[in-house]
Image (spheres, rainbow, N blue to C red):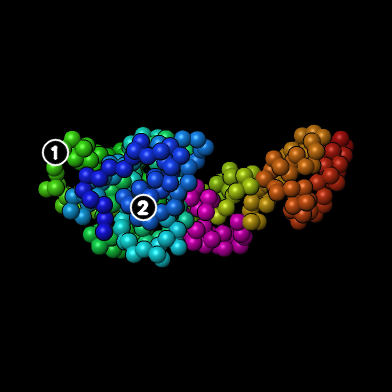
């Protein structure tokens, strides 16, 4: 059974030492079964104001930094099937689902689906409106390709975000607006179409160049994962791997070559310790650096630096 109309949850009502435990229970009551953890130590503040308009539920969330996860285990334990859309009002956040990550700045919105794992991540205090509807209320074939794709709140998408923010504001002010619920569902379907049409995955040479450019940008980060690269390219993991396979290479190989290329620049620049070069170029340690460098260049970093210096002198 869902939450009652006009429900309010607030950590101000409980002992500060119990605030986050209360918050974790509250978000499960307001939305679906979720796990959560605070991003920072110390006191935690959070509040949810909830309104139900037939199939459409509106929840304004005002809280401190946190990470929220909808895991496979939680999905197995509950049969909740909802489509949700977060509209960012203040602060920034990220929504991750289906191998994509949508960055939400104020005014932006993105969809996510309770039947598959997702993550909501907020590095600082934030305020957002969450719109929640049963999946049965929206076209079944459209939602799957539109999750974790940010609509930036300009142009046609602005009509959708303004409508829902205004609808929640009217409810907060005590002005019932149940008659608008059918329009809400229509606008959600419209926004799903915007997400699908505006984020068609690119193909061909342009996509290959994008993948290589992203890898060059993130290679020095030890966390240069397939999920991160795919998200930065605005494609799915499957599309990323398809592009790499067509090129006859792998993500690991491209990242390794880029790190070695950067390492050669640092080695050429002066007597920097090999361990420092390894760290700055994203390697887990000198041993991994030595293996990768030898695999790409055919010799050790120290030997290459000595040889390169000799060649430049001559």
Q: Is residue 255 visible?
A: yes
Which residue is at 64% across, 44% downward?
220
Label 1 SS: loop
Q: Earlier in the sequence, mark 2 or mark 1?
A: 2
Q: Position of residue 103 (x, y in %)?
A: 43, 43
Q: Which is more foreground, mark 2 or mark 1? A: 2
Pick the quarter of the image with the C terminus: top right
Q: Nearer the viewer, residue 80 or 151?
A: 80
Residue furthest to the front in view is 15
Q: Position of residue 55 (x, y in %)?
A: 21, 55
Q: Quadrant of residue 7?
A: top left
Q: Is residue 153 above or below residue 215?
A: above
Label 2 SS: helix
Residue furthest to the left in view is 179
- CA gap, disc 2 and disc 1: 27 Å
Q: Answer with left or right where residue 17 lies relative to residue 298.
A: left
Q: Answer with left or right where residue 77 lies relative to residue 174.
A: right
Q: Which mark is residue 175?
A: 1
Mark 1 nearby-residue class (10 Å; few <14, some 14–19, many ≥20): few
Q: Quadrant of residue 81?
A: bottom left
Please give the range of residues in magenta: 227-251
Total numbered badges shown on the rendered structure: 2
Q: Quadrant of residue 312?
A: top right
Q: Position of residue 79 (x, y in %)?
A: 34, 64
Which residue is at 19% across, 40% downward?
171
Q: Answer with left or right where residue 1 lies relative to residue 272.
A: left
| Residue identifier under label 2 | 28
Pick the quarter of the image with the N terminus: bottom left
Residues at marks 2 and 1 touching, judged by CB atoms closer than 8 Å: no
| Magenta residue check for 237 | yes
């Amino acid at each position: 059974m869902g939450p009652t109309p006009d429900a309010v949850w607030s950590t101000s009502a409980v002992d500060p030492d119990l605030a986050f435990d209360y918050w974790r229970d509250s978000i499960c009551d307001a939305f679906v079964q979720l796990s959560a953890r605070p991003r920072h130590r110390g006191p935690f503040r959070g509040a949810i104001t909830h309104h139900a308009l037939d199939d459409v539920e509106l929840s304004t969330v005002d809280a401190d930094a946190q990470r929220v996860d909808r895991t496979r285990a939680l999905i197995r334990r509950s049969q909740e099937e909802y489509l949700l859309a977060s509209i960012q009002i203040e602060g920034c956040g990220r929504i991750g689902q289906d191998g994509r990550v949508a960055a939400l700045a104020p005014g932006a919105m993105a969809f996510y689906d309770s039947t598959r794992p997702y993550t909501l991540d907020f590095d600082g205090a934030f305020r957002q409106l969450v719109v929640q509807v049963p999946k049965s209320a929206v076209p079944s074939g459209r939602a799957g390709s539109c999750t974790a794709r940010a609509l930036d709140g300009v142009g046609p998408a602005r009509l959708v975000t303004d409508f829902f923010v205004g609808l929640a504001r009217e409810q907060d002010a005590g002005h019932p607006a149940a008659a608008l619920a059918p329009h809400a569902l229509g606008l959600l379907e419209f926004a799903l179409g915007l997400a699908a049409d505006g984020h068609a995955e690119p193909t061909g040479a342009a996509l290959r160049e994008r993948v290589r450019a992203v890898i060059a940008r993130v290679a020095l980060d030890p966390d240069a994962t397939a999920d991160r690269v795919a998200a930065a390219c605005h494609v799915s993991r499957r599309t990323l791997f398809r592009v790499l396979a067509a090129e006859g290479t792998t993500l690991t190989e491209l990242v390794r070559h880029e790190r070695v290329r950067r390492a050669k620049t640092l080695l050429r620049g002066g007597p920097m310790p090999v361990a420092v070069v390894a760290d700055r170029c994203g390697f887990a340690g000198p041993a991994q650096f030595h293996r990768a460098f030898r695999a790409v260049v055919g010799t050790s970093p120290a030997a290459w630096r000595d040889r390169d210096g000799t060649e430049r002198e001559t």
